[in-house]
Image (cartoon, rainbow, N blue to C red):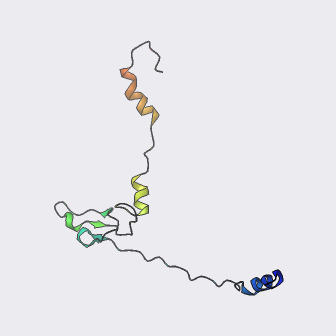
Amino acid sequence: MSLKNTTSFLRRSRPGPQTARPRLTLVPIPPRILADLRPRQCRYCVADAPKGDMDQALFCAAPARFGPYCAEHTAMTRRAEPFDLDAAWAEIRPFLRPGRPPF
């Protein structure tokens, strides 16, 4: 097979114009009580139950690929609180010896 024939073969075998892919629609997953949760469903509590009725609390139930929470709730639980340097200094200052530099 000559190089010329290979090139013409490649040109003919290219796919035509790409067709539009079907759009995915996201369907909201209704929250579930703990007894109805399946494995790999998010266990983030979205609605607390009245005192003494924890079996009626509602959980997220979105797909949880890694760990007990879905991606959104995993990010929420790992978000760091802002650090207030002035409040920390106010707590530390009384314990420093007078006349000694803090650092």
- Position of residue 94 in the picture relative to residue 12 (left or right): left
What's the residue at 35%, 65% (across, down)? 42
What's the residue at 37%, 61% (across, down)? 69
- Residue 99's place in the image compared with 42, above or below, is above
The residue most toward the right is: 4
Q: Position of residue 54 (x, y in %)?
A: 20, 63
- Position of residue 51 in the picture relative to residue 3 (left or right): left
Q: Position of residue 44 (x, y in %)?
A: 33, 62
What's the residue at 33%, 71% (across, down)? 31
- Position of residue 84 in the picture relative to residue 4 (left or right): left
**Residue 62 vs residue 45, the one in the foreground:** 62
User: How many numbered circles does the render carry?
Assistant: 0
Considering the image in quadrants, where does the N terminus appear? bottom right
Q: Position of residue 82 (x, y in %)?
A: 45, 43
- Residue 70's place in the image compared with 25, above or below, is above
**Residue 4 vs residue 47, the one in the foreground:** 4
The residue most toward the top is: 99
Q: Position of residue 79 (x, y in %)?
A: 43, 51
- Residue 42's place in the image compared with 98, above or below, is below
* Quarter of the rendering containing residue 59: bottom left
What's the residue at 41%, 32% (across, down)? 88
* Quarter of the rendering containing residue 92: top left
The residue most toward the left is: 52
- Position of residue 8 in the picture relative to residue 82 (left or right): right
